[in-house]
């Protein structure tokens, strides 16, 4: 055993010496390796000097530790070097790699699987020797991990880099995508708006330039006439603007309507201010207190509503604004009517303003505006059986457009039931117009400019008057009449017109009216919910037929005195001179007095057989309207009962005569009750 | 009990105003109590001989006694 022990010691010493030799050789190699890396990694000269001067001593120390304490604490640098070497040596040999122990040895140096303390001990020397922090990871990778792991790490790093790159690219792409559609949308919206505005302005300009009469050489000026928002019972403000062109010489005059008052001439910036006021004026009217608007009507005496005394007399924003407009700060660029007296000449139909001096004083390309007021459009009201008729009118030649009309109602309909009020625009068309409606059916329907429609309507009215006076048939302005007819056909079905014209079918009610009356007009009461009722009106002397059409118009209802009932409605009149509207209260069941005058709406009381009754006094009527035509299949049973004969007011003795016998009322009522119960029980 | 007491007083007032005779259903609707509560109150009134009851089929009509008139 001793011999074996000695021999084994010899072997052990031999092995140690071999190992020492190997380690010495390896230390030399590793020194050169580290040195190269240090140089490559731009380590400081101090570090390299320390390494070069102390290397052999340190290697010796390391070796000593490695020999004595291999199993206790593996020196990180040593283990790193050994592991690197081991990895390089063991990887090509599959048998060693597959062994479980060898696998552990291989896996131990992997940074990811080592304990945190071990990682620190490995990293610290690396940090000490290789200073730049940015290169620490690369240096650690090269030193402490096998090539495979280093490759994996590099792959991971690359993967991260790739991911980062991708995400960066995606972000940029997303931002780009988001930005581009926004720009496109904005551009689209802007373009559309601008286009619409331009079209509107163009229409207005065309319309009004045609109306403007210009004398002298001012035909060269492009004159634009604009109407401020018109409200009935208030004067309408206008402005005519044009740009100065001094190349046109001579006597320059501008024609304005004869009714024009408060004429003012503006130049330069004042014109733009005035034009901007047009939009402000419209907004102020929209936002104005309706009490104030209605107040004007009451002052004028055109409204006879029940709420007139409820409306406050204080001046509101609208009045103040109009006063402000009238008293607008006058600069040197505004010339008022009193200064223009010499320049204004009244002619038969117009007023003529000589603008020669003003244009001479104005600068080249300056804008000149002529403001004036024309008489207010008015409304006349007439009470009809089921509501009221409102005729909105204005001077023909002024051709007001977009007029705000309103009327005061007498607290009959709840503000929550505004649908019970119907506003109809009543239009009359003659036989000739009806006949003309058929003709364009085979022709192309063209879009008719609003301007043209207005003008032709007036001309057709003139033609109708001629026909009424017994003169020749309508032969003039065929093209324009066709244009109007086109518009009519668009609004109304052609079939209706065809029936009426081909076969002069007159409603039974109309025939009855004709047989009873010799006058040319007959008003039909509309007791149904049909929105458009056609009325044929035959003049026996002139043999002409007119048709009245009712077109429902939207309106806005207000409760000015805040009692929950509608007392004011307003609507827009597209154009004047003379338009008729009817305001109808829609009630499905109404109590009428002996003169068929509306008393109250009793629909809620009588709509169901629910023990809620309504009292119709002797001589009065109840009128019930049905939404659908009635026939034999529809049940129209009317439940009515006599008022209790035993009520104290009518029967002071509390007796009722039944078959000549006086029966006390309480007995009679008990008997009635028992009969009612028996009837319900089916006995 | 206080509730039934109130209902009894309410029923007496209703029957005094309406002498035609009322069913339990009608009384419960007018007093805004359940039919059970109305029945209990009416039973108490019947026990106290303050009301008359007339039976018609499966229906009862309730009247206030004449002495209350």
Image (spheres, coloured by chain):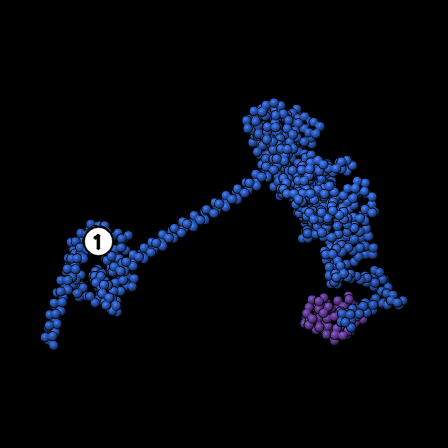
Chain colours: A blue, B purple
Vertical position of residue A208 compared to residue A161: above or below:
above
Vertical position of residue A36 compared to residue A395: above or below:
below
User: Which is more toward the observer, A648 or A469?
Assistant: A469
**Residue pictured at 23% horizontal, 51% vertical:** A41
Residue A53 relative to residue A457: left or right = left
Residue found at the far right of this picture = A660
**Image x and y of residue A557, in percent:** 67, 48
User: Which is more toward the observer, A266 or A220?
Assistant: A220
**Residue pictured at 67% horizontal, 45% vertical:** A441
**On-image quarter of the N terminus of chain A:** bottom left
Residue A536 relative to residue A367: left or right = right
Q: Quarter of the image holding residue A202?
A: top right
Residue found at the far top of this picture = A250
Q: Mark 1 points at which residue?
A: A37
Q: Mark 1 lies on which chain?
A: A
User: Which is more toward the observer, A88 or A560?
Assistant: A88
**Image x and y of residue A467, in percent:** 76, 37
**Residue pictured at 76% horizontal, 69% vertical:** A680
């Amino acid at each position: 055993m001793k011999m074996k022990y000695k021999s084994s010691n010899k072997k052990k010493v031999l092995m140690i010496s071999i190992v020492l030799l190997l380690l010495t050789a390896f230390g030399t190699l590793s020194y050169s390796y580290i040195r190269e890396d240090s140089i490559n990694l731009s380590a400081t000269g101090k570090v390299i000097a320390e390494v070069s001067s102390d290397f052999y001593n340190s290697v010796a120390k390391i070796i000593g530790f490695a020999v004595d304490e291999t199993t206790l604490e593996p020196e990180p640098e040593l283990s790193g070097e050994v592991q690197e070497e081991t990895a390089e040596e063991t990887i090509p040999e599959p048998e060693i790699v597959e062994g479980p122990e060898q696998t552990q040895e291989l896996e131990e140096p992997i940074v990811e699987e080592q304990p945190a303390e071990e990682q620190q001990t490995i990293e610290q020397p690396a940090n000490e020797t290789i200073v730049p922090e940015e290169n620490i990871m690369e240096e650690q990778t090269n030193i402490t991990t096998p090539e495979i792991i280093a490759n994996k790490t590099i792959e991971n790093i690359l993967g991260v880099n790739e991911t980062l790159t991708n995400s960066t690219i995606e972000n940029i792409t997303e931002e780009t995508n988001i930005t581009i559609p926004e720009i496109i949308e904005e551009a689209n919206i802007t373009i559309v708006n601008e286009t619409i505005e331009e079209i509107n302005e163009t229409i207005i300009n065309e319309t009004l330039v045609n109306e403007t009469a210009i004398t002298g050489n001012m035909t060269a000026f492009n004159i634009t006439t604009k109407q401020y928002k018109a409200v009935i019972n208030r004067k309408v403000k206008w402005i005519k603007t044009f740009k100065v062109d001094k190349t046109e010489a001579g006597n320059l005059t501008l024609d304005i309507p004869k009714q024009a008052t408060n004429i003012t001439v503006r130049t330069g910036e004042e014109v733009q201010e005035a034009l901007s006021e047009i939009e402000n004026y419209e907004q102020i009217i929209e936002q104005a207190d309706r009490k104030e608007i209605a107040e004007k009507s009451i002052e004028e005496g055109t409204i006879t509503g029940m709420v007139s005394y409820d409306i406050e007399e204080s001046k509101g924003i609208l009045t103040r604004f109009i006063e402000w407009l009238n008293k607008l700060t006058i600069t040197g660029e505004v010339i008022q009517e009193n200064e223009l007296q010499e320049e204004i000449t009244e002619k038969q139909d117009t007023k003529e303003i000589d603008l020669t001096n003003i244009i001479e004083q104005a600068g080249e390309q300056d804008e000149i505006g002529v403001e004036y007021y024309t008489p207010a459009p008015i409304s006349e009201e007439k009470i009809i059986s089921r509501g009221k008729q409102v005729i909105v009118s204005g001077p023909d030649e002024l051709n007001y457009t977009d007029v705000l009309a309103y009327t005061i109602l007498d607290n009959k309909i709840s503000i929550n039931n505004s649908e019970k009020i119907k506003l109809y625009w009543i239009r009359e068309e003659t036989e000739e117009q009806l006949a003309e409606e058929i003709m364009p059916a085979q022709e192309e329907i063209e879009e008719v400019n609003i301007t043209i429609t207005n003008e032709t309507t007036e001309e057709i009215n003139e033609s109708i008057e001629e026909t009424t006076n017994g003169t020749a048939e309508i032969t003039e302005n065929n093209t324009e009449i066709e244009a109007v007819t086109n518009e009519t056909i668009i609004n109304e079905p052609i079939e209706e017109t065809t029936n009426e014209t081909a076969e002069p079918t007159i409603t039974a009610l109309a025939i009855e009216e004709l047989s009873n009356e010799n006058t040319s007009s007959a008003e039909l009461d509309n007791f149904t919910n049909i929105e458009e009722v056609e009325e044929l009106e035959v003049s026996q002397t002139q043999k002409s037929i007119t048709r009245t059409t009712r077109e429902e118009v939207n309106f806005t209802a207000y409760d000015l005195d805040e009692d929950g009932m509608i007392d004011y409605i307003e609507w827009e009149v597209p154009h004047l001179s003379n338009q008729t509207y009817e305001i109808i209260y829609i009630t499905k069941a109404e109590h009428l007095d002996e003169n068929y005058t509306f008393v109250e709406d009793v629909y809620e009381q009588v709509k169901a057989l629910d023990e809620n009754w309504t009292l119709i006094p002797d001589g009065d009527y109840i009128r019930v309207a049905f939404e659908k035509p009635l026939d034999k299949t529809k049940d129209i049973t009317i439940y009515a009962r006599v008022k209790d004969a035993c009520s104290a007011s009518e029967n002071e003795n509390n007796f009722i005569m039944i078959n000549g016998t006086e029966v006390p009322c309480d007995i009679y009522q008990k008997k009635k009750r028992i009969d009612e119960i028996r009837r319900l029980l089916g006995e | 009990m206080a509730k039934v007491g109130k209902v009894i007083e309410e029923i007496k007032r209703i029957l005094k105003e309406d002498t035609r005779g009322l069913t339990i259903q009608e009384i419960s609707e007018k007093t805004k109590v359940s039919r059970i509560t109305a029945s209990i109150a009416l039973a108490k009134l019947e026990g106290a001989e303050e009301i008359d009851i007339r039976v018609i089929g499966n229906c009862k009509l309730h009247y206030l006694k004449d002495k209350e008139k």
